[in-house]
C-alpha cells in the first residue's frame, strides 16, 4: 500500500490541502484468495486480448513440455505416439488429427509437445499449490499468459496440423528442418515433402504451403471440449514446434506474468480452494481420482477412539 500527497488546490481564495491518495498495488505474492482476486482486478485484459493461466508448484520449473525435458523422450517421440495407438486403438478411434491424439496422450501422462493451460485462474492456482513430497517446502508460482484472442488457434487449424505433425518425424528429420533457411527451401526439400505427406493424410485438401515460421513457433490452441478433464479444468494448450522452451521474452506475442505462491501458504490456499469446489474430485472427474479425493478427506482416528466391531 503506497500513498502520494497531491498539491493543494485553491477554493474561494482558500488553499485547501487534499488528503493523500491511496493506491492499491497487486500483491507481490499470493497468500490467500483475496490476494488472487486483487491480482486479477489489476490484470484485466485489454480489448481483443485474453488471459490464460498455469500453475507451477516449483518456481524453478521451465515453460517446457514434458517431451523436451528428457533427450531420450524427444528422440523417440514418433515411436511413443505410434506404440500407444497400436496398443490401445479403440481409445483413439474418434481422433481425426494428430493434435487430438497428442491431447489424449497428454491425458494419460505420456510425454508430448503440449503444455497445459487453463482459462480459470483458480485452476492455475490449484496446480501451483499441489505439491509433491520433494517440493512441499518450495515456493510455487501462478503464471498468467496475456495474448491476442485472434492468435489462439482451434483444434482443426491448418497451422496446428503443421506443428502437430512434427511428432511424425524422427529426431534427425526435425534436425534437418532446423537447418532449413526459408519456406521456399522447405517446399523443395525432401523433409518438406515428408512433413506434407503426414499433413495431407489428415487434411487431403491441404496445399503445399507450409510456413517455416509456423514450425518454429509456440501456439495457443483451444481444443475440443469432449474430454471430461479438459471440461472440468477449462483447459487449453500451448503446442511447441521446433522450439523446446518458452522464454518470458519471446517473439510469439505471448506476455508472461509470474506471481509467487509461498510454500507456507499452499495448504491454506488449497483449503480455501476446496471451499469453492476447486479440488481433485472436481478437476479430475475420473473415478480413480474421485476415490483418492474421498479417501484424502477422511480424518485420522485417534487410537483411544477405536472400538471393536
Image (cartoon, rainbow, N blue to C red):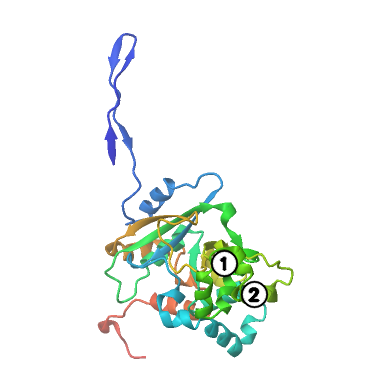
Q: Residue 283 location in percent, x, y?
A: 49, 69
Residue at the image point whose x is 74% and y is 68% from the top: 205
Q: Of the numbered discs in the image, which one, if any, rests on residue 307? A: none
Cβ–Cβ below 8 Å for labels 2 and 1? no
Residue at the image point whose x is 71% and y is 68% from the top: 206
Quadrant for residue 89, please give it: bottom right
Q: Residue 101 location in percent, x, y?
A: 59, 77
The image quadrant where one finds the N terminus is top left
Dot 1 lies on which element?
Answer: helix
Quadrant for residue 58, please give it: bottom left
Give the class, few, some or many, for how many residues have Cα within 10 Å of label 2's Cα (few <14, many ≥20): some
Residue 82 is left or right of residue 127, and the answer is: right
| Residue occupying the far right of the picture | 205
> Which mark lies nearer to you, 2 or 1?
2
The residue where tag 2 is placed is 193
Q: Residue 128 location in percent, x, y?
A: 38, 65
**Of 170 and 5, the residue lying toward us:** 170
Tell me, yes or no, if residue 61 can be seen here.
yes
Residue at the image point whose x is 30% and y is 23% from the top: 18
The residue where tag 1 is placed is 231
Quadrant for residue 93, please give it: bottom right
Amino acid at each position: 500500500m503506497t500513498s502520494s500527497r497531491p498539491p493543494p488546490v485553491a477554493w474561494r481564495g482558500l488553499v485547501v490541502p487534499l488528503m493523500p491518495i491511496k493506491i492499491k498495488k497487486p500483491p507481490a505474492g499470493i497468500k490467500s484468495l483475496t490476494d488472487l482476486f486483487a491480482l486479477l482486478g489489476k490484470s484485466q485484459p485489454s480489448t481483443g486480448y485474453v488471459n490464460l493461466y498455469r500453475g507451477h508448484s516449483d518456481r524453478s520449473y521451465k515453460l517446457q513440455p514434458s517431451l523436451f525435458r528428457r533427450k531420450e523422450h524427444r528422440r523417440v517421440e514418433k515411436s511413443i505416439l505410434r506404440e500407444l495407438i497400436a496398443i490401445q486403438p479403440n481409445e483413439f478411434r474418434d481422433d481425426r488429427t494428430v493434435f487430438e491424439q497428442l491431447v489424449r496422450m497428454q491425458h494419460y501422462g505420456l510425454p508430448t509437445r503440449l503444455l497445459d493451460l487453463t482459462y480459470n485462474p483458480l485452476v492455475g492456482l490449484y496446480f501451483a499449490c499441489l505439491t509433491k513430497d520433494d517440493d512441499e517446502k518450495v515456493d510455487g508460482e501462478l503464471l498468467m499468459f496475456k495474448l491476442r484472442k485472434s492468435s489462439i488457434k482451434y483444434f482443426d487449424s491448418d497451422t496446428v496440423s503443421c506443428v502437430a505433425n512434427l511428432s511424425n518425424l524422427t529426431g534427425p528429420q526435425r534436425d534437418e528442418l532446423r537447418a532449413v533457411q526459408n519456406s521456399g527451401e522447405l517446399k523443395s526439400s525432401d523433409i518438406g515433402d515428408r512433413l506434407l505427406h503426414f499433413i495431407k493424410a489428415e487434411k487431403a485438401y491441404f496445399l503445399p504451403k507450409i510456413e517455416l515460421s509456423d514450425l518454429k513457433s509456440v501456439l495457443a490452441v483451444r481444443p475440443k471440449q469432449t474430454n471430461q478433464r479438459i471440461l472440468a479444468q477449462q483447459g487449453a494448450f500451448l503446442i511447441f514446434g521446433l522450439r523446446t522452451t518458452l522464454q518470458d521474452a519471446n517473439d510469439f506475442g505471448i506476455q508472461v506474468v509470474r506471481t509467487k505462491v509461498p510454500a507456507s501458504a499452499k495448504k491454506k490456499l488449497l483449503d480455501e480452494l476446496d471451499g469453492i469446489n476447486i479440488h481433485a474430485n472436481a478437476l479430475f472427474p475420473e473415478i480413480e481420482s474421485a476415490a483418492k479425493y474421498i479417501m484424502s478427506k477422511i480424518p485420522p482416528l485417534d487410537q483411544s477412539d477405536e472400538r471393536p466391531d
